[in-house]
Amino acid sequence: MIIYGHYKEVAKSENQGRKAVFFIGSTIGNLLPLECDKFLHEVASCLKSGDLMLIGFDLIKSPQTIIDAYTLGPNEAFYKNILERINNQLEGNFDLDNFEHYFSYNPINGLGATFLISKKEQKVRIEACESEVFFQPWEQIHISFHQKYNTKNIKELAEKVGFEVIHSFYDSQKYFSDSIWRLK
């Protein structure tokens, strides 16, 4: 059985066959450690011994490679699109030119974070919420976390939540891994 989307309902079905959960991409890296543990424990609680999980991980690599990946090209427009969507869907009045994209990465713990930073003092109105938000110069909006992993972290994470790593696949540069886990 393949589980996707609303995994809890599907996983708890009475199907007697082996189940496989696919959590591809590197979305797991957008969760903080406690959120990650909670999510993986929830998935494990829906499975039986021997069931599988395929999970994608963005791997630790050169800090400059990581910084470039989040700062070059279309990244600023991608993250500012969040403000654009608030403007379009919630009747906001964010001036996108008044915000700059900023990414930080700590190679010691492998954690990156993305922010939009207000360039000046400003007030933003969001009609759908009937609210105003005030920004000071250089005040940030936290957008997302980006945890990077190594093979040791992946093995430890799997074991912590009751799985064992049975195989990992890597891209040619070893920048990314798809790891197959089996519930013990």
Image: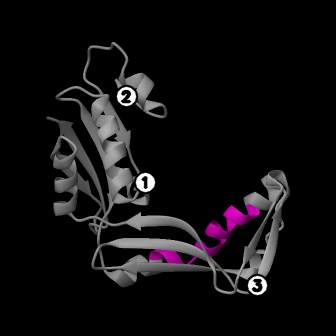
* Residue 45 falls left or right of residue 4: left
Q: How is the image coloured?
A: one colour
- Rendered residue at 32%/43% (across/down): 40
- Rendered residue at 82%/62% (across/down): 92
The Cα atoms of the two marked residues, 1 and 2, are separated by 18 Å
- Return the x and y of residue 103 as percentages of the image width and height: 50, 78
Q: What secondary structure do most residues of the magenta stretch adopt?
A: helix
Choose the circle earlier in sequence order: 1 or 3: 1
The Cα atoms of the two marked residues, 2 and 3, are separated by 50 Å
Residue 18 falls in image quadrant:
top left
Can you identify the residue that label 2 sits on? 2
Q: Secondary structure at mark 1?
A: helix
Residue 61 falls in image quadrant:
bottom left
Can you identify the residue that label 1 sits on? 27
Give the position of the C terminus as an image quadrant. top left
- Return the x and y of residue 163 as percentages of the image width and height: 18, 41
Q: Mark 1 belongs to which amino acid?
A: Thr
Choose the circle earlier in sequence order: 1 or 2: 2
From which residue to which does the magenta span run?
69-84
Residue 117 falls in image quadrant:
bottom right
Can you identify the residue that label 3 sits on? 121
